[in-house]
Every structure is written in structure tokens, then in C-alpha cells.
């Protein structure tokens, strides 16, 4: 796939596109769902519930962290991950906006 053109779009639009792109993988959605249920965890806990190698899970965690969906704190040899409330709120606001403005008229296909 080629490079995505991001110039000419607002910073907010580009940020939301990166967030949604990161969430567009089944493993990452599973990670988010796991964190929603557990509030926080270490990488090893996530590896136990996914059908993926530890290195693959780490890559997915890295992608989610890069766009801010999750945050992690180092505790000894472990990294404790949790969802970033600010980014989750941005996603919720965007989805709510789509939901409230989409197809309000009967002219919609």
C-alpha cells in the first residue's frame, strides 16, 4: 500500500484517522476489549488470552500506544497497560457525532 496523503486535512481529522486505523485490526480490538474488562494488566496477561505470540502482541500494543489509545507504566520488569480516557472520549465524541448527524433526512440512501 502506498503512503497516505495527509496534507490538506485538519490535525483532528488526521489524528482520528490514525486512531481508527490502529483500531482496525482484530487483535487490537481484542486488546482494547480486554483492557475495558480489566482496567489494567501486564503484557503477559494479554498474551494468555490472544492466539498470538508475545512478540506479536507487543507490536500491537506498541501501535495502540503510538496513537494514544493505551498508556503503559513500567513496574519492575512488567508494563501495566490501561486505556487512555482522553483518547477514548475523543473516539466516543466522533462516533456520537456520526450517529447524530447521519441520515437524519428521509432522502438518505
Image: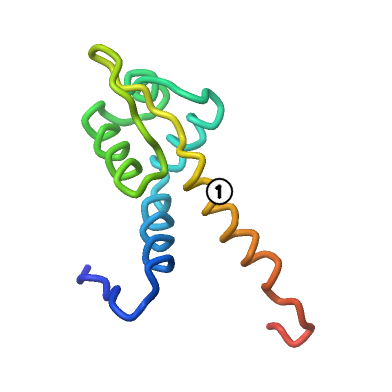
| Residue drawn where x is 30% and y is 40% of the image | 60
x and y, in percent, of residue 83 in the image: 46, 35
Q: Which image quarter: residue 105?
A: bottom right
x and y, in percent, of residue 72 in the image: 34, 29
Q: Is residue 4 above or below residue 76?
A: below
- The colour scheme is rainbow
Which quadrant does the N terminus fall into? bottom left
x and y, in percent, of residue 36 in the image: 54, 32
The number of numbered badges drawn on the structure is: 1
Relative to residue 21, is residue 83 drawn left or right? right
Q: Residue furthest right?
A: 106
| Residue drawn where x is 29% and y is 46% of the image | 66
Q: Is residue 12 above or below residue 60?
A: below
| Residue drawn where x is 30% and y is 22% of the image | 79
Relative to residue 73, is residue 1 drawn left or right? left
x and y, in percent, of residue 62 in the image: 27, 39
Which quadrant does the C terminus fall into? bottom right
| Residue drawn where x is 67% and y is 64% of the image | 99
| Nearer-the-camera pick, 59 or 40 | 40
Q: Residue furthest top?
A: 76
- Name the secondary structure under disc 1: helix
State the residue position of label 1: 89
Q: Residues within 10 Å of mark 1 (few under 14, many from 20)?
A: few
Amino acid at each position: 500500500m502506498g503512503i497516505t496523503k495527509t496534507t490538506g486535512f485538519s490535525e483532528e481529522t488526521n489524528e482520528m484517522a490514525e486512531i481508527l486505523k490502529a483500531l482496525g485490526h482484530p487483535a487490537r480490538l481484542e486488546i482494547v476489549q480486554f483492557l475495558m474488562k480489566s482496567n489494567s494488566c501486564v503484557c503477559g496477561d494479554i498474551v494468555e488470552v490472544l492466539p498470538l505470540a508475545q512478540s506479536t502482541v507487543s507490536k500491537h500494543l506498541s501501535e495502540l500506544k503510538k496513537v494514544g489509545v493505551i498508556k503503559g507504566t513500567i513496574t519492575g520488569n512488567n508494563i501495566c497497560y490501561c486505556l487512555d480516557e482522553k483518547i477514548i472520549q475523543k473516539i466516543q465524541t466522533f462516533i456520537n457525532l456520526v450517529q447524530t448527524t447521519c441520515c437524519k433526512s428521509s432522502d438518505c440512501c
